[in-house]
Amino acid sequence: MTQYFSRLNAISFFSFSVALCFLASSALAQDIVHPGYEVAPERRTTGIGKFYMGREISFVMGHQAAQWLNRPSRIQEEMPDQVVANMGLAADDVVADIGAGSGYFSFRIAALVPEGKVLSVDIQPEMLQLIEEQKMRNRVENVDGVLGEIDDPNLPAESIDAAIMVDAYHEFSHPFEMINGIYQALRPGGRIFLLEYRGEDPSVPIRPLHKMTEEQVVKEMSVFGLEWTETLDFLPWQHMMIFTKRG
């Protein structure tokens, strides 16, 4: 902890004029205050040198690594079918898969919401193209790609019943703005499923900035008054954390 605070002494505050812009946004109307960002003179190997609530943000995995997202070992490492089964979805739910990548989770979710829809949100058009090709190949009609922005998931207000982020949140360069957009898009009672590699566990073979502790995630979600419903720890390496928008 001492090392952490000594490092922060060398970090300059991100311009508060940026934060003030957000105070004029819809977030202000709901008494949500932007905690602000900090920038460091040097970044860590896998970081971008930008901090949010004490956490350095990781770089984004590019579409060039799409094959890694579909690696066979992911079935054992991340148990995607069990994850989707534990979401408790209704057949007509609308679910946003934020940072959908190649659609690894999107199509699994789609099978469970035959009367609903999956909105596969990604900032990389190349990823959305992969999803579109898989849609056509497998004749899936209830998955729609959505081109997001680094600070906006581009989802209409109160349009979704749930959002899921799998190993993606730690890469958001604008986490406040992204969660604000998701929060606004959730219907009252809607849920966020947030999966991250366990930062508390040094035995998890993932680089530190690509992991998050439960404590850190809860702290960041609390900015929006999201209710920490529960954490499911049946996965080998990840937390599956559930947050609910109060009705």
Image: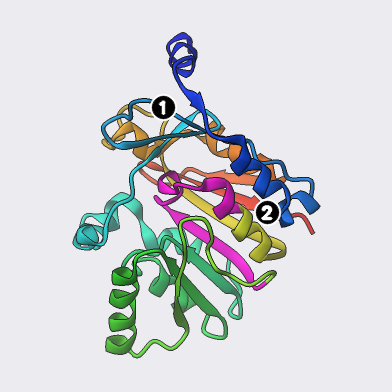
| Image: 38 above or below 24 | above
Look at label 2 and name its amino acid: Thr
Q: Nearer the viewer, residue 122 or 210?
A: 122
Q: Nearer the viewer, residue 214 or 54?
A: 54
Residue at figure coordinates x 21%, y 57% from the top left? 68
> Label 2 neighbourhood size at 10 Å, few (<14), some (14-19), many (20+)?
many
Residue at figure coordinates x 46%, y 11% from the top left? 6
Q: Nearer the viewer, residue 58 or 138?
A: 58
Q: Is residue 120 visible?
A: yes
Instruction: Give the spatial CA distance, label 2 vs label 1.
Output: 33 Å
> Label 1 neighbourhood size at 10 Å, few (<14), some (14-19), many (20+)?
some
Residue 117 x %, y %: 53, 80
Label 2 or label 1, whichever comes before in sequence order: 1
Q: Which residue is mark 2?
A: 244
Q: Is residue 198 part of the magenta span, yes or no?
A: no
Residue at figure coordinates x 27%, y 56% from the top left? 62
Per the rendered image, the range of residues in magenta is 159-179
Q: Which residue is mark 1?
A: 40
Residue at figure coordinates x 20%, y 60% from the top left? 64
Residue 197 x %, y %: 39, 41
Q: Is residue 227 visible?
A: no
Say if mark 2 contacts mark 1, CB within 8 Å: no
Q: Is residue 172 part of the magenta span, yes or no?
A: yes
Residue 125 x %, y %: 33, 71
Label 2 SS: strand
> What's the mark number on residue 138?
none
Q: Nearer the viewer, residue 210 or 42?
A: 42
Of the 4 image quadrants, the one containing the C terminus is: bottom right
Look at label 1 and name its amino acid: Ala
